[in-house]
Image (cartoon, rainbow, N blue to C red):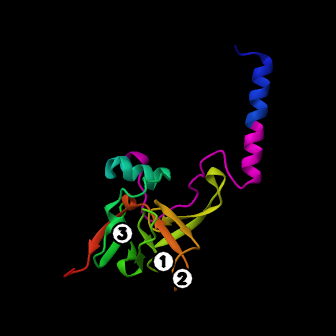
Amino acid sequence: MMTRRNLGLGAVGAAAAAGIAKVLGGSTEAAPRAKAFPVAFTEEEWKKKLSPEAYHVLRQHGTERAGTSPLDREKRKGTFACAGCGQDLFSSETKFDSGTGWPSFFQPIAGAVGTSEDNKFFMRRTEVHCARCGGHLGHVFEDGPKPTGLRYCMNGVAMTFRPAEGA
């Protein structure tokens, strides 16, 4: 039964959760896309262009389940590109097995990706997005191998793979 007391306690709880999220660097809302990118479509056009899984990751900042992407096990020489716009993102020469269940790279192709701060889920992370269409690709962490020490942990569904000729 909803009473004034229960309603008041609910409001206090919601305000406390929002305050905690702010203190811990979190957010109670999805971050808006403020920047315009060279490749842009309406949300309906993106939905028609992408699979439901790719749309969820690229356009809604989702995450695929670990270990589900064949690109995590891809060992051939070639290029990993954005599934949204085709922008080349990573060379196979920078790919490594991080053991996380997601395709991981220590360096993107110059100018191919952008980053922004991601404070969702009470964590402070660095989001990686395609520099051409703004599609969410994954996150970058500072626990990767030399020479960069970075681990670009990408969602495989957000990318395609183009093998090098003769590979």
The answer to whether residue 29 is magenta is yes
**Sequence-first disc among 1 and 3:** 3
The answer to whether residue 87 is magenta is no
Q: Residue furthest bottom?
A: 147
What's under tag 1, amino acid-wise? Phe
Proximity of marks 2 and 1: CB atoms separated by less than 8 Å: yes
Q: Residues within 10 Å of mark 3 (few under 14, many from 20)?
A: many
Q: Residues within 10 Å of mark 2 (few under 14, many from 20)?
A: few
Residue 16 image point, x, y percent: 77, 40
**Sequence-first disc among 3 and 2:** 3
What's under tag 3, amino acid-wise? Ala
157 sits left or right of 130 in the view: left
Q: Residue at x 60, y 52 (%)?
A: 31
Report helix, strand or loop for mark 3.
Answer: strand
Residue 47 image point, x, y percent: 37, 47
Query: Vertical placement of 38 versus 105: above or below?
Result: above
Q: Which residue is mark 2?
A: 148
Whole-number angstrom distance, CA of label 1 to CA of label 3: 15 Å
Report helix, strand or loop for mark 1.
Answer: loop
Q: Residue at x 35, y 78 (%)?
A: 92
Q: Residue furthest top?
A: 1
Q: Residues within 10 Å of mark 1 (few under 14, many from 20)?
A: many
Which of 37/153 is in front? 153
Instruction: Specify start and end residues of the magenta stretch as a single range.
Output: 15-44
Q: Which residue is mark 1?
A: 106
* The quarter of the displayed image where residue 143 is located: bottom right
Which image quadrant: the C terminus?
bottom left
